Image: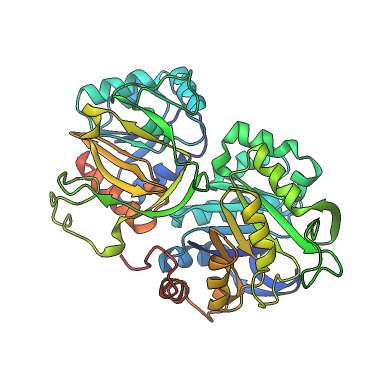
């Protein structure tokens, strides 16, 4: 099981908010990335959450600085619209590139990225929201809808269908965020994660809602995730990576030890 | 100088940076003549076997790889770079490997999520102490490390299945729906299916041991 801190970056700073609103400063991305590597994080995800064209150069600079000091896999996302965008990030030091809105708008992008760069560096980030009236369980199909643009835009796409389509097109991994849970610290949406996990055979990262160490355990045990993404529980020092890993290990979940 | 063969695929900078981080004079090299003079050579590889095989041939660096291995220059193949040492791969049946080691590259167990994209523990083959894995004390700091020292980062859907002659080169394996070749070693020829450049401190230590084998750092 991989423990993956996520750094949401806005104008060059790590921020964290609730449902992408009310952002709170959490530090310098490259510094934080290096710290998480040293503390034993298994991977890092850095998402440019503003992703305006002005910020593109800032982000490349951040990736370059982070890559100097980080020797674990680095996934970069936010505003990737083309193979050229992805290549620029890989050149700057990213190992994987996450695509989201642009892939929904033009699914062929996934095929192009996988063909040019290899599936191993193509992560499709899926932001999912429960359709009104589907919590708790009501009907089995089309319960979760893909949303884009930081949750502001509904697409009408069924999450499970979209995840399947991403896999067919050559995605190497799915980063699945529950927009209902993101920033709430109420725990991952386990039903969502398990549904996607049983639909596609790709590695699956659960995201959105981790607030306690029990949430991590539940994500691994019940959500069938192969990676656990969390932000605020690490950024603000409530738990260390070592805390998370020893708790997972104590619950029988295999993790890489943080001490060697 | 350690030459990291740059044959125009993916992100090869990370291998160069990680070697530099451990004090080696490592550089991405496209010029076959320059690569032939290096004290050590690294063949990284990401993406599909066929694409890497074709790109390596186009670059003319395939001949350098054969030459330096023949001459006993320390050589490290990483991921698809390891796979390329074998004859071919089920991933792209028409593509040819360098066939320096007998055997083919096969798909991992379909019962598991593919690719294997995770950290996994490498079990050293006890009867075969490895300079690369640090299971033989050849340097002052080459002694055994802690229990976490054999965890490395893997990203792959295929792995080599060495045949008789090459089977004895396997020095480490991991479990992913069955045993999977993780590291090979034969004289100065080394290979890892995992990515040492992405395996944190453990990977840096491994690269430092390779650099030491090259007489660097």
Based on the displayed image, in which of its 4 quarters is residue A154 positioned?
Answer: bottom right
Q: Which residue occupies 44% across, 30% down?
A: B6
Residue B110 or B216: which is nearer the viewer?
Answer: B110
Tell me: B155 left or right of A112. Answer: left
B91 vs A46, left or right, is: left
Q: Residue at x 34, y 27 (%)?
A: B85
Residue B65 position by quadrant: top left
State the colouring used for the structure image: rainbow
Q: Position of residue A101 (x, y in %)?
A: 77, 50
* Farthest-out residue, front: A139
Q: Position of residue A107 (x, y in %)?
A: 75, 40
Q: Is residue B217 visible?
A: no
Task: Residue A197: tell me if it is visible.
Answer: yes
Q: In terms of image quadrants, where is residue B160?
A: top left
* Residue A212 in the figure: left or right of residue B30: right
Question: Looking at the image, which is closer to me, B208 or A118?
Answer: A118
């Amino acid at each position: 099981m991989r423990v993956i801190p996520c750094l949401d970056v806005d104008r060059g700073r790590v921020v964290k908010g609730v449902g992408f609103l009310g952002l709170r400063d959490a530090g310098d991305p490259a510094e934080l990335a290096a710290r998480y590597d040293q503390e034993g994080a298994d991977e890092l995800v850095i998402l440019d959450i503003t992703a305006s064209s002005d910020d593109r150069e800032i982000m490349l600079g951040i990736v370059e600085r982070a890559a100097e000091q980080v020797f674990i896999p680095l996934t970069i996302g936010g505003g990737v619209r083309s193979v050229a965008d992805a290549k620029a990030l890989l050149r700057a030091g990213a190992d994987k590139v996450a695509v989201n809105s642009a892939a929904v708008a033009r699914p062929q992008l996934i095929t192009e990225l996988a063909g040019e760069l290899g599936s191993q560096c193509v992560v499709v980030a899926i932001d999912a929201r429960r359709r009104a009236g589907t919590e708790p369980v009501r009907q089995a199909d089309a319960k979760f809808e893909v949303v884009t643009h930081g949750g502001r835009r509904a697409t009408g796409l069924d999450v499970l269908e979209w995840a399947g389509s991403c896999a067919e097109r050559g995605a190497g991994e799915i980063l699945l965020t529950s927009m209902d849970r993101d920033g709430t610290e109420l725990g991952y949406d386990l039903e969502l994660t398990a549904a996607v996990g049983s639909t596609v055979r790709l590695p699956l990262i659960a995201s959105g809602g981790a607030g306690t160490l029990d949430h991590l355990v539940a994500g691994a045990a019940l959500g069938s995730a192969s990676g656990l993404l969390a932000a605020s529980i690490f950024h603000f020092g409530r738990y260390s990576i070592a805390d998370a890993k020893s708790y997972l290990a104590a619950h029988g979940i295999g993790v890489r030890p943080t001490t060697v | 100088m350690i030459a990291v063969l740059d044959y125009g695929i993916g992100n090869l900078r990370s291998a160069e940076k990680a070697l530099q981080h451990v004090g080696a004079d490592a550089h991405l090299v496209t010029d076959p003549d320059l690569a032939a003079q290096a004290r050590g050579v690294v063949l990284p590889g990401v993406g599909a076997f066929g694409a890497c095989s074709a790109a390596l041939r186009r670059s003319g660096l395939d001949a350098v790889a054969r030459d330096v291995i023949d001459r006993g220059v320390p050589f490290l193949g990483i991921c698809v770079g390891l796979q390329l040492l074998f004859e071919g791969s089920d991933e792209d049946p028409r593509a040819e490997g360098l066939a320096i080691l007998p055997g083919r590259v096969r798909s991992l167990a379909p019962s598991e999520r593919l690719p294997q994209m995770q950290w996994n523990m490498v079990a050293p083959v006890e009867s075969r102490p490895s300079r690369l894995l640090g299971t033989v004390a050849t340097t002052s700091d080459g002694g055994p490390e802690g229990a976490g020292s054999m965890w490395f980062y893997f990203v792959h859907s295929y792995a080599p299945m060495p045949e008789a002659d090459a089977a004895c080169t396997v020095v480490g394996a991991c479990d992913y729906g069955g045993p999977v070749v993780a590291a090979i070693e034969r004289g100065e020829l080394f290979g890892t299916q995992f990515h040492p450049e992405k395996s944190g401190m453990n990977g840096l230590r491994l690269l430092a041991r390779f650099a030491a084998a090259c007489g660097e750092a």
